[in-house]
Amino acid sequence: MAKTTNDMTKMMQDMMSAFPVDATAMQDAFKSSAALGEKLSSVALEAASISTEISSKWTKETIEKATALTKVKGEPTDYTKAMTDFASAQAEMTAENMAAFAEVAKKVQMETVELMLAAGKDFSEEATAAVKKATSDVTTAAKKAAAAK
């Protein structure tokens, strides 16, 4: 008895050709994802830039205060006063700069949430449109297949 071998490649090609694929939906999804990535990167880079400015300003102010601290004093008690003034200034600068960093973090968080909500809405709308189109295409293909029999 002779065995017949099924051509699996041909079967897969036939099966895949029976299901219409909308490449534009894939392209649109990719473009949406890329646009979201660009917006999120923009938010992150802006936050990094502002954070760098805060750090730089803080460092410059600390160096200025340290310079005053290192100058020769006339009396031993002047050194104590200089250290106290430096520590007090550092505490104040720390509070101000930490508040500035917190504002940057808060802004990043708010912008990220807004972007994610907008992206979720856009993706949902795109997915709904793609499913409707795919359903329509499959229904049309099924009707053609049924009519051909």
Image (cartoon, rainbow, N blue to C red):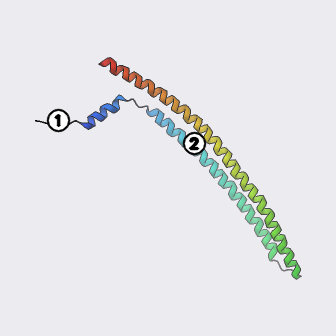
Of residue 135 and residue 54, the one placed in the foreground of this image is: 135
Q: Which residue is mark 1?
A: 4
Query: Which of the two discs, 1 and 2, labels the residue nearer the N terminus?
Result: 1
Q: Which quadrant: the C terminus?
A: top left
Give the x, y percent position of residue 128. Answer: 52, 30
Count of numbered circles in the view: 2
Label 1, label 2: how far apart the Cα atoms are: 52 Å
For image coordinates 82% across by 66% down, the residue present is 89
- Secondary structure, mark 2, is helix
Direction from residue 101 to residue 42 in the image, left or right: left
For image coordinates 69% across by 54% down, the residue present is 50
Residue 36 numbered mark, or none: 2
Q: Residue furthest front?
A: 1
Residue 92: quadrant of the picture: bottom right
Give the x, y percent position of residue 61. Answer: 77, 65
Residue 60: quadrant of the picture: bottom right
Q: Nearer the viewer, mark 1 or mark 2?
A: 1
Looking at the image, residue 118 lies above or below residue 72: above
What type is the residue that disc 1 sits on?
Thr
Direction from residue 80 to residue 102 in the image, left or right: left
Q: Give the crowd class for mark 1: few <14, some 14-19, many >=20 residues within 10 Å.
A: few
Give the x, y percent position of residue 27. Answer: 48, 36
For image coordinates 72% across by 58% down, the residue present is 54
What type is the residue that disc 2 sits on?
Leu
Looking at the image, residue 69 lies above or below residue 28: below
